[in-house]
Image (cartoon, rainbow, N blue to C red):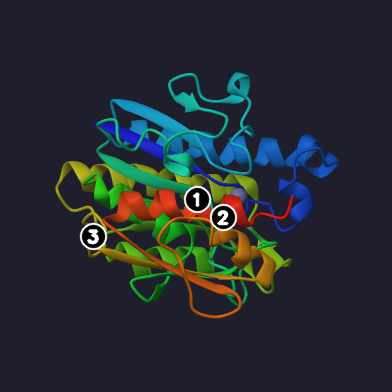
Amino acid sequence: MKILIAGDMEGVSGITQWEQVTPTHGEYLNRGRALYTGDLNAAIEGAFEGGASEVVVSDGHWAGRNAPIEQLDPRARLNYGSPSPMSMVQGIDQGVSGLMLVGYHAMAGTAEAILDHTWSNSSIAAVYINDRRTGEIGLNMGVAGYFGVPPLLVTGDQNACAEGLAFGGAGLRTAIVKTATSQFAAELLPLVESRRRIREAAADATRALWKGLAAAPLQIGAPTRLAVEFILSRQADRALLFPGTVRVSGTRVEVVLADMLQTYRAFRALATLAADN
Ligand SMILES: [Zn+2]
């Protein structure tokens, strides 16, 4: 039983500020990366405790270079760097039995959600898949569902976990590691407690998978209509370079794709085209 742990940083224990998740910033270098690796190691521990035979981590934040391999539990392998074919869920197409989302955050526009955004804080206001507003949790669960992989666990603040349950369904396990009171403020659990929650939820989720009690893979209807609401009109101007796109307002671009895998690729392409850099 092979488990893929997809890691992001905004929902990690102790994190409330962009500086903590921004490479080159002192808060990231001295604290953010270690906090991230601590949550990943708790999930790895739990997955093995629950009966996993193999654990692969996909480092999904920023350019995918955050968890130092020398500090990661040596039983796990690490997908590191970008671009990779499956981005935040690199490895999802390689015989995975279940997906865990560790350190995830709520979609752009969510109230009381630490560092809420969807892919890019500077260019994307909202994403809709078949008219359902979707963030990174739904996008990554959706591409996992394309490969028949069920979501097992979401860890993050209370609203990231609620979003996980909304997309993953009742069989999903969650671990709330902090309670957000705004985009940049939260009541933090002591690390020993938040990591205990992650470990126990990961173990429980893996046992549920053994027993056939895990959530079902998220199925997205095909063909799939993807809509991206950009923040600025020039970002939509550039996204329109992607074949098949239609502009439906100054900032909104839509395109119909054959399935969720193509949708994930198209979304990444639109976000890359639109990026202001
Ligand atoms: Zn991130």
Residue 79 at x, y = what percent? 48, 28
Work out how far the residue at label 3 is from the one at label 1, CA to CA, in angstroms.
Answer: 20 Å
Q: Is residue 12 visible?
A: no
Q: Nearer the viewer, residue 91 or 236?
A: 236
Q: Nearer the viewer, residue 151 or 259?
A: 259
Of callouts 3 and 2, the N-terminal one: 3
**Secondary structure type for disc 2:** helix
What amino acid is at disc 3? Gln
**Secondary structure type for disc 3:** loop
The quarter of the picture where the N terminus appears is top left
Residue 151, compared with residue 185, is above or below; it is: above
Q: Are marks 3 and 2 in contact (CB under 8 Å)?
A: no
What amino acid is at disc 2? Ala
Task: Report the residue marked by disc 2.
Answer: 271
Badge 2: residue crowd in 10 Å (few <14, some 14–19, many ≥20): many
What amino acid is at disc 1? Arg
Residue placed furthest toward the left? 212
Q: Residue at x 61, y 59 (%)?
A: 238
Residue 219 circle label: 3
Q: Residue at x 30, y 64 (%)?
A: 224
Residue 187, compared with residue 40, is above or below; it is: below
Q: Are marks 2 and 1 in contact (CB under 8 Å)?
A: yes
Task: Report the residue marked by disc 1.
Answer: 268
In terms of image quadrants, where is residue 260? bottom left
Residue 261 at x, y = what percent? 32, 49
